[in-house]
Amino acid sequence: MDFDANIADTLIKLFAAWLLLAGVAYWAKREGLGLSRKMLFASGRGLLQLLALAFVLHWIFDIQSHLAQAALIAGFCILAGHNSASHHDGGRATWLACAIGLICACLVTLPWLAVTSAISDDTRTLVPLGSMIAANGMNAISIMFSRLKSGGEMGDGLKTAMIPTIDTLRVVGLVHMPGIFVGMVLAGASAIDAAVAQLIVLYMVVTSSFTACLITFLMMNHLNKREA
């Protein structure tokens, strides 16, 4: 009975949250924005992907090999690169450039943080942080592509891509109470330790997002020149 009650409670919470998304999807449809189908498809896809991750996460965290950790993070970058490439021309060269940019972003940040003991080098730390770099870098590259397609220069695209990340860093603790900080405090960690951990992640995200955008742009130029 308790298990059934927990399942029912979980489904009610999910449905309540999903109704918010469904409401804005309906609004977007009325305005003719072409976003409603994307929103609804993404919500279903996200649900399935998170459920799948929940089932395999304990196997992922059992990984001890640094090579396997690197391969898994590279996989995140390749998938994220494919999504970002779809915001440009969807070509293989663009996909490759995005994937290389994201992998470079991980290489610039994660080894340095691990060597300096700013973070642990175990799977429970590196893999979630690698996925965070891939996701934030993907968003930054997609924004950069959107700006470039509207006629902006490379500098304009990079500046626009960095606005959300830099704004988050500027207002953290004033407007934004980030998840890592809140989660650690609720778990019993001191507020100072939680703040330090959150700042490490924010500095990492700013650095990795900038690196991902810059390397992606340079790689695209290089590949385009080779094809020409």
Image (cartoon, rainbow, N blue to C red):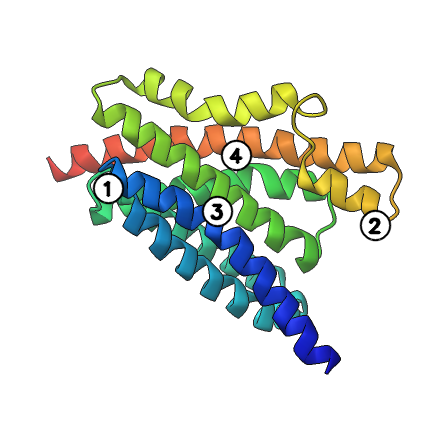
Dot 1 amino acid type: Gly
Q: Which residue is mark 1?
A: 34
Horizontal placement of 90 versus 207: left or right? Answer: left
Residue 35, given in percent of the width and then of the height, sits at 29, 43
Task: Pick the quarter of the image with the N terminus.
Answer: bottom right
Dot 2 amino acid type: Ala
Of mark 1 and mark 2, the one earlier in the sequence is 1
Of mark 4 and mark 3, the one earlier in the sequence is 3
Q: Quadrant of residue 171?
A: top right
- Identified at 36% across, 54% down, the residue is 40
Residue 177: assigned label = none
Of mark 3 and mark 1, the one earlier in the sequence is 3
Residue 208: assigned label = 4
Q: Which residue is mark 3?
A: 20
Of mark 2 and mark 3, the one earlier in the sequence is 3
Q: Secondary structure at mark 1?
A: loop
Residue 97, given in percent of the width and then of the height, sits at 31, 41
Above-or-below relation of 19 to 53: above
Residue 187: assigned label = 2
